[in-house]
């Protein structure tokens, strides 16, 4: 205790805390709290808890704000991932339905499938909905969109 109060700590940063008192004495925090006579002497020299400095409070406030923002951003990411998964499922289902309809269309004679417009028949081309998705980016206005210019 004498070293800590004199500002000459050997094992701590020198802050006048009970935790540092325990470290300087080489005992556990619980041991310090059981030693009532030592605590009484400590409280006589350090009558009130050490306050945080304004810069420490500002730092802690900034950390709290950033943690809150991070939690909110993670929630938005989860929500957007859910929407993306749902849209990918819808796209895959529409793709499968489109293929089925094209096969059905090409399985009949063109005049029967399209009336007199047999020249409108098109070849079935493979389409992969997953590989055709372009990477999304955040636009300056905060919305999501494909890379490049947007309307």
Image (tube, helix red, strand yellow):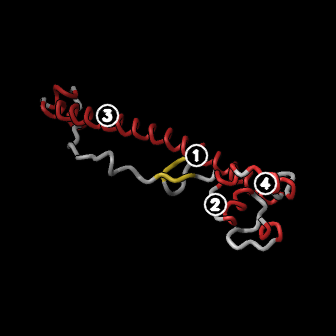
Return the disc, 3 or 1, that comes first in the chain's sequence.
1
Where disc 1 sits, the SS reads: helix
Which of labels 3 and 2 is toward the front? 2
Q: Earlier in the sequence, mark 1 or mark 4?
A: 4
Q: Position of residue 56 (x, y in %)?
A: 77, 58
Question: Which label sits on residue 94?
Answer: 3
CB within 8 Å, label 4 to label 2: no
Name the spot of residue 129 as percent of width and height, x first: 32, 45
Q: Secondary structure at mark 4?
A: helix
The mark lying in front, picked from 4 and 2, is 2
Query: Badge 4 is on which residue?
Result: 57
In x, y percent, where is residue 49?
Answer: 82, 52
Mark in front: 1 vs 4: 4
| Circle 1 residues within 10 Å: few <14, some 14–19, many ≥20 | few
Dot 2 corresponds to which residue? 27
* Residue for point 43% across, 41% down: 84
Estimate the spatial distance between the alpha carbons at disc 3 and disc 4, rounded to whole Å.
55 Å
- Residue assigned mark 1: 73
Marks 1 and 4, how far apart at CA = 24 Å
Q: Which mark lies nearer to you, 1 or 2?
A: 2
Give the distance between the C-alpha atoms of the residues marked 1 and 2, in whole angstroms. Answer: 43 Å
Query: Along the polypeptide, which appears first: circle 4 or circle 2?
Result: 2
Marks 1,2: beta carbons within 8 A: no
**In the rendered picture of this protein, how many numbered marks are placed on residues?**
4
Q: Position of residue 101 (x, y in %)?
A: 22, 31
Callout 2 secondary element: loop
Q: Is residue 112 left or right of residue 18?
A: left
Name the residue nearer the viewer: 95 or 17. Answer: 17
Identify the mark nearer the N-term, 1 or 2. 2
Q: CA distance from mark 3 to mark 2?
A: 69 Å
């Amino acid at each position: 205790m004498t070293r800590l109060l004199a500002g000459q700590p050997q094992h701590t940063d020198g802050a006048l805390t009970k935790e540092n008192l325990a470290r300087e004495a080489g005992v556990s925090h619980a041991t310090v709290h059981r030693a009532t006579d030592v605590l009484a002497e400590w409280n006589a020299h350090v009558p009130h808890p050490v306050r945080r400095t304004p810069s420490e409070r500002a730092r802690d406030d900034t950390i709290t704000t950033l943690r809150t923002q991070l939690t909110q951003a993670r929630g938005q990411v989860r929500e957007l991932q859910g929407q993306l998964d749902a849209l990918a499922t819808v796209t895959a289902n529409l793709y499968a339905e489109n293929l089925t309809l094209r096969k059905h269309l090409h399985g009949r004679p063109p005049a029967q499938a399209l009336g007199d417009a047999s020249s409108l028949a098109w070849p079935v081309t493979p389409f992969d909905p997953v590989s055709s998705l372009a990477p999304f980016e955040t636009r300056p206005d905060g919305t999501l969109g494909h890379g490049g210019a947007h309307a």
